[in-house]
Amino acid sequence: MKKQINVDLFLSWFETNKDNELSRANVWKQDNDQLTASFKQDWPLSRIKNMTIDEYVIGHGSKSKSFCYEIEQGKYKNLHLSIQGGTARKFGIYWSRKSHSYIDKSGKILTEVEAATIFNQLRVELVNLIESVQNREYNILLDSKQKKLNSFVTRYALTTKIVCLYANHQDFTGINFQSNKALWLSFLKGTDSDISKNDSAYLINNKVTMILTQQVPELTNILLSFVLWDFIQNYAELENNEVRKSNNIMENGKMQKLHQVVTNSHNVILHGAPGTGKTFLAKSIAADIISGGKTTYFSELTEEEQEQLGFVQFHPSYDYTDFVEGLRPKTQTDGSMGFELKNGVFTNFIKKAQHNFELSQKSERDQVLENQSKNLLDTYLENVEIGEDVLETTRGSEFFFSDINEEQIELTIPKNDIANKVNLKISDLQDMIASKQSFKHGKDVTIFFKKYQRRRQEDSYYLAVFNDIIKKRKVSIPDSKEVDIKEKPYVFVIDEINRGEISKIFGELFYSIDPGYRGIAGSVLTQYANLHDDPTQKFFIPRNVYIIGTMNDIDRSVDSFDFAMRRRFRFVEVKANEHLEILDALSDDIKYEAIKKLTQLNHEISATNELNENYHIGPAYFLKLNDINFDSLWQDYLAPLLQEYIRGMYDEIAIMLRFEKAYYQTSDQNDNADNQR
């Protein structure tokens, strides 16, 4: 029988393992105390109040000493708790090497003015948070309404770390309680704390910390973080298994069937009425495929597995340059404007899938060589000082690193008045390292890269950087190191696929996405192939890529959905009553009432002339009940939608009255009875 995770179980476990736990926790505490003292010297509140945007953001140089870099990846990454994983968007703003610009939390490229405005607000909110914590004024954290006033409150792991870094009192522990809120609510059952699922994760953290430090005084919040985390690692899986059994849509075999449909067909579109949870289901299927059936939750995928899931939402303005590739404006070093070819979101995703597929097909020896070369190059680039490390070619031409992104290295040649910029492809450098060849002259590089068919200016710089990498190599990775890279599934979700102009977005990829032409057999030259380093290189989609689209059946753009595209997808209908587990996020009483209203309302919709199940109301609409009541849901969301459905029909008022009665579960008989009283 499963043990219920609660305070009593923790106390019993701690008493049994006390000596070992305290011994290990105190070692961790010593390191933590030293780092805390160092952090408070490096990042006092006075510095936070006056820091610049580049002191805050992550992304400016591989050796960035910014606040965000330091606490996520740098010196203080393991202090109190780790916040690694996900994207830099969690900081509200970051610098993108790829676009050479600041990016906000939604992924939007910002102008300098926009970036300054957003950062100034973030700095005010961060200072407000730190001052509140230091003054022991926790309302900003404990009141769930405060998240609308301070955006940091919604960044749970980051804010928990900031609280632990700056707090003068031991009122919180270094664990992100939001990541498994249900488990901690269960943990507090049987105590005097009046906690509900609507309370903030910080309040739950505070209650757990206060209860446990009172019952076990020797566990300060620092020690408690270590010991409590150890306890959860021992017992959390038991609780998670129970949660999955009650919430997971794999319970009735639906997920196994959908998993098989996608992997067999490669291209699937989930279609149905609005609000039926198609996007939620698409991500669940993707997580199930990527994890090999271990989970249907994206949040439970490892950081590496999350890279195997791509997502985009189509809209009328979306086009080929966003999806595949296109020319994008770029500010030159002299201030003038130019253009450069940039990959679209789909191309970048396919490149990751291609790399995995091609590597999985190589021999073990080739996999070892590629892994060694990648590790060596990554280590080298991590230690490059942007704008400072100066190298020279065999002819004495000096240059320095001006930028590094995921695909290429930008070099600046200050004494070259004609062409003072050179870009080196990271993949080409990696190929040179993996070849184990000796390169002594620029012509050796030219011969190696036969695909370019001519001597290039870049070859001398490839040679100089390559030789510097070899020179600075500290310890080579043994050839005997085992590498066994398997073929992995990559899933790309296209939300609202019918809202974009399909032929304009996919272009020649109509051919490549056909399940019958995956791999080299379906390779095509893209529209901008003549601008590629190798103009003969073709685009193809490997067999380990699966595409899931979502589509609302009543959307007016459905009629214009390209028939050639329809033939390449398998269509799976998602009905309003099939995935009611979406409503598990509601309390039991509200969930029960929501299902009754949904069922009654959809029954009345089906009974209305000119309407059918494509016009049903999906359960996702009822998730709004976490913030509003049933009346507001009807007045502000459902009634306007239904009014739009029946616009132009005969006797609209009578139809809307029937819908309202169905929603409120009243009848004409009840009305007559009320009138007689």
Image (spheres, rainbow, N blue to C red):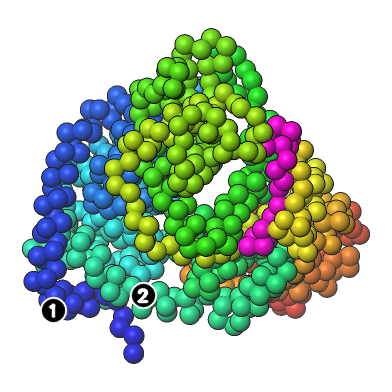
- N-terminal label among 2 and 1: 1
Position of 260 compared to 606: left or right?
A: left
The residue at 14%/50% (across/down) is 31
Task: Examine the image and state in which quarter residue 218 appears.
Answer: bottom left
Alpha-carbon span between mark 2 and mark 1:
20 Å
Tell me if I can see residue 127 in this picture.
yes
Mark 1 lies on residue: 16
Q: Position of residue 96 (x, y in %)?
A: 49, 34
Position of 204 compared to 676: left or right?
A: left
- Three-letter code, disc 2: Glu
Task: Examine the image and state in which quarter residue 278 appears.
Answer: bottom right
- Three-letter code, disc 1: Thr
Choose between 302 and 469: the one closer to the eye: 469
The residue at 55%/81% (across/down) is 251
Task: Check residue 186 for magenta coloring.
Answer: no
Task: Check residue 545 for magenta coloring.
Answer: yes
- Badge 2 marks a residue whose secondary structure is helix
Q: Position of residue 667 (x, y in %)?
A: 73, 75
Q: Position of residue 427 (x, y in %)?
A: 53, 42
- Badge 1 marks a residue whose secondary structure is helix
Choose between 297 and 286: the one closer to the eye: 286
| Whether residue 286 is situated above or below residue 501 in the rendered picture | below
Instruction: Give the position of the C terminus as an image quadrant.
Output: bottom right
Q: Position of residue 187 (x, y in %)?
A: 29, 72
Q: Residues within 10 Å of mark 1 (few under 14, many from 20)?
A: few
The residue at 51%/44% (across/down) is 431
Choose between 645 and 186: the one closer to the eye: 186
Magenta stretch in the rendered image: 528-553
| Whether residue 104 is situated above or below residue 556 in the rendered picture | above
Task: Examine the image and state in which quarter residue 200 appears.
Answer: bottom left
Mark 2 lies on residue: 237
